[in-house]
Amino acid sequence: MGKQIMIDPITRIEGHAKISLHLDDSGVVDEARMHVTQFRGFEKFCEGRPFYEMPSLMARTCGICPVSHLVAAAKACDDLYSVQIPEAAVMLRRMINLAQIMQSHALSFFYLSSPDLVFGMDADPAMRNLFGVHAQDPQLMRDGIRLRQIGQQIIELLGGKRIHPSWVVPGGVNAPLTEEHRDTILAVLPEAKALAQRTLRWYKKIMKQFKPEIDTFANFPSLYLGLVDKLGNLEHYDGNFRMMDAAGNIIIDQFDTLRYAEIIEEAVEPWSYMKFPYYKSLGYPRGMYRTGPLARLNIIDACGTPMADDELEEFRGGSTKPVQSSFHYHWARLIEILFAVERIEDILTTKRVMTKHVRAYATPNSFDGIGVTEAPRGSLIHHFKIDEQGLVTWANLIIATAHNNLAMNRGILQAAKTFVDGNHLKEGMLNRVEAVIRAFDPCLSCSTHAAGQMPFHVELVAPDGELLDEVKRGV
């Protein structure tokens, strides 16, 4: 009989999940699954609520990337209004989303993944953590804390709060940018650039130590999906879909995001509360694609800012084919941090951003609204339907993390087959399997919407430890 190894929980990620590795009789991994074990169900919470509550309500799906949910839901409300929001509002929304890209990428790279990068995958877990990194390389840790702080400060200056700001509203934003806040943000951007560049230099030096991981961390052909602007450049707020295949061929370009349902379908499995989106033309599971920073850098023609474009050229290494190893999500995040700083600076030095007209007012002119933006982890889709009273009757959220679900599951299988020896098991082997998931930086609180019949076991225990009652399903 084969064995089963459980990694429960997956550490240094946002949310709750576990990995099951199934071994054959000789101790070789033949199957691997990531089980997302939490269920939130925000789509159901929406039903019966006024549509204009959606931005603030949807922001509560996550404390790490609330701005992306805020923006996507607000864009869906703009679609319900059928209005074009003011230009200044577009720039301000774009800027707050870029600030969130900064802080979230910094959180992922420095707080969650840097212990593996500083100490190696086989290091003692007692050392392989945030405090160990601070003791080993305090400058690196200070840089990470400061980069995230700058991103959060920009969010606060724009939106009034660092977490769950209510500044982004249907029709635009609820207050214009002040000169004081503009000058405060501009003053910290040179420091943010320097920190991002220093981290990039450090990462490119140590990256060579991880060739086995680069070769096996979800390193396989797939499709890549993300937004691009009209010039084919990096875009996080607006734009249209582009999809690239593993050979570098663009198979979908400038595809209207309002038509997302024509290209994306979602599957559900009984062993996870996270859905499995796929490219409809290839079917499930052949239609696997990746999204997020790695995919975004693969599909674009250019970033559109000078420093980020220089880094993009090095990232691609002169090849026209996409970078396939998911280990390089780390590298892509650092480049996007640099891009975000440059792009925010560009916006703040544009006089039009100071325009006082930042909100359009209307009543619903459509019963169906869709909003799409790029969250730190990938393309984020909010879709709402309303009745004549403006109450939500149906909602569908395709979360950035969920797009990568098929790739994450295939990635842990690839790594487990390479590193895990069921007959001579070591902690570092299992850490590498976890590290594949950390490379994708999943945000599981946002992405768990697939209500099904996943097994659960609930116990009611008295203060003295006596089991009073229990309920089991599929256990």
Image (tube, grey):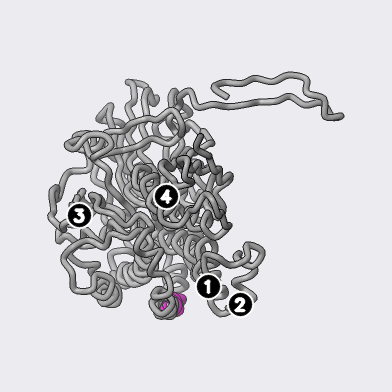
Mark 3 surroundings: few (<14), some (14-19) or many (≥20) residues within 10 A: some
Mark 4 or mark 2: name the one nearer the start of the chain: 2
Instruction: Tell me residue 101's x, y (percent).
Output: 40, 60
Query: On the picture, is 205 further left or further right than 82?
Result: right
Residues in magenta, as a range: 187-195
Element under disc 2: helix
Residue 52 visible from this viewpoint: yes
Tell me the distance, in whole angstroms, between the alpha carbons under discs 2 and 1.
8 Å
Q: Is residue 290 above or below residue 210?
A: above
Question: Residue 93: x, y in percent?
Answer: 36, 55
Q: Main secondary structure of the magenta part?
A: helix
Q: Residue at x 30, y 31 (%)?
A: 364
The residue that disc 3 covers is: 246
Amino acid, disc 3: Ala
Q: Label 4, label 2: how many angstroms apart (C-alpha)?
A: 29 Å
* Count of residue discs: 4
Residue 43 placement, left or right of 352 = right
Q: Answer yes or no: do the residues labelled 2 and 1 have beta carbons within 8 Å?
A: yes
Q: Which mark identifies residue 118? A: 1
Q: Residue at x 58, y 57 (%)?
A: 427
Q: Amino acid at mark 4?
A: Ile
Amino acid bearing label 2:
Gln
How crowded pointer 2 is (Cα within 10 Å; few <14, some 14-19, many 20+) is rated as: some
First-in-chain label (4 vs 1)? 1
Q: Earlier in the sequence, mark 4 or mark 3?
A: 3
Q: Earlier in the sequence, mark 3 or mark 2?
A: 2
Q: Which residue is mark 2?
A: 136
Q: Which residue occupies 63% across, 65% down?
A: 124
The residue labelled by disc 4 is: 412
